Amino acid sequence: MNILLVGAGGREHALAWKLRQSARCDELYCIPGNVGIEECATCVPIKASEIDKIVSFAKEKNIELVVVGPEAPLVDGLADAISAQGIKVFGCSKKAAQLEGSKGFMKDLCAKYDIPSAKYGRFTDLESAKIFIQETGAPIVVKTDGLAAGKGVIICNTTDEAIEAARAMLEGAMFGDAGKEVVIEEFLDGEEISYFALADGKTILPLASAQDHKRVGDGDTGPNTGGMGAYSPAHFMTAELEEQVINELIEPTIAGMAAEGCPFTGVLFAGLMVKDGVAKLLEYNVRFGDPECQPLMMRLNGDLVEILDAAAQGRLDEVKDQVKWADDVALCVVMAANGYPASYEKGSVISGFEKANAVEGAYVFHAGTDRNENGEIISVGGRVLGVTAKGSSVAEAQKRAYEAVDKINWEGGFCRRDIGWRAL
Ligand code: AMP
Ligand code: GLY
């Protein structure tokens, strides 16, 4: 079948790479894609935000399945617009995307369906927020209700800090509409991991765990980023913990969403805080993680077209046996442009891909790459490459990934040197 993938990051390169391996994949298009994706798909210069153009393109090219990578087009209703044309879509409706798009919506769902999560309050005025903060005490977490490009969560060590954070969100211009409402919640202690599951509106198909590295510096120091590296499976994931996550979090969420009249189809990405072997939900995303998707796709043995197509059609129970995971660990090291996550330069030349891809078990996924007028590969984003490798252990996958990193020639970039450290 002809497939259209929407997105341009490392996550989408990993999805394109895996979709391309399927015997069921005919033409594969990617909107807008990147240099790496060009190797497995035809990239089309339309933006992921141009919903009408995407719909017209899908009709024109007889696309049978649209796979949406990032959350923004889902929040804007891309999946609804595609399915209105009778085209199958892997990605949730605008209504269901509130799980990621509105923290208040997500917290209310957890409260209503007894899903373990931090105690919270929703506020649109500072006075009531203040009372809640003073009653709860510090540490405490203040969040914008809406999407704020990863900057909408402030962990506060004192109640004064929390009041200031709530004021900045509710009264300041910095967070725009995202901060018109805030969610204030109890601080949860523990270790963070991610868990991924597919859903087709009613049935779930559990995937696997991963652990991200959100801080920019080694040893988890410095500012937050979109993720500087990830590996799968997470080192302390056990069968018991997985069962708890599925039974107490994922299942009731999918059942709750259906009961609320917004059935969820797509991939549910649960951000978890685990303490003493028990997980609580920090957040939901309605997409694969980036960079978590890169190690997940590398470990997946199974036909991704078949699996996502089944999810889009509400027949996930038919493909349960198709999803198998390599016993290997896969680990992804993100190479970012100097300066990231603050302002960074674009346009520096990168080479060495062939040598990096020749390292045993390694593959370089592209994120923010393009070509200059000389045809050279250049950086055009903050996170630019996801150098990923498989190995029989975290140590081996890490060794191979860094061996591949060291084959990349790029003066304008850097990476963390300790991805996977919590597992080692
Ligand atoms: P979120 O976008 O809600 O995942 O928040 C971003 C990050 O803030 C998470 O990955 C956690 O590291 C941290 N965080 C969010 N909520 C809490 C909480 N209630 N307790 C502790 N840390 C939190
Ligand atoms: N790596 C975290 C995320 O995709 O949100």
Image (tube, rainbow, N blue to C red):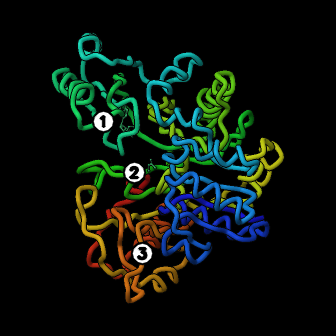
Distance CA(mark 1)–CA(mark 2):
36 Å
**Residue located beneath label 2 in the image:** 422
Which residue is pictured at 34% across the width and 30% down the height?
143
Q: Nearer the viewer, residue 33 or 339?
A: 33
Position of the C terminus, as image quadrant, is bottom left
Packing grade of label 1 (10 A; few <14, some 14-19, many >=20) is: some
Would residue 146 be found to the left or right of residue 277 on screen?
left
Where residue 25 appears, x then y in whole percent? 74, 67
- Mark 3 vs mark 1: which is more N-terminal? 1
Q: Quadrant of residue 164?
A: top left
Which residue is pictured at 41% across the width and 67% down the height?
368
Kind of residue at badge 2: Arg
Kind of residue at badge 1: Gly
Packing grade of label 2 (10 A; few <14, some 14-19, many >=20) is: few
Determine which of the numbered discs, if any, sits on residue 176 in the image.
Answer: 1
Where residue 64 appears, x then y in whole percent? 75, 58
Kind of residue at badge 3: Asp
Secondary structure at badge 2 equals helix
The residue most toward the bottom is 374
Q: Is residue 212 above or below residue 169?
A: below
- Mark 3 vs mark 2: which is more N-terminal? 3
Where residue 14 appears, x then y in whole percent? 56, 64
Residue 37 appears in the rendering: yes
Secondary structure at badge 1 equals helix
**Residue located beneath label 3 in the image:** 370
Which residue is pictured at 38% across the width and 86% down the height?
373
The residue most toward the right is 318
Q: Is residue 195 above or below residue 95?
A: below
Secondary structure at badge 3 equals strand
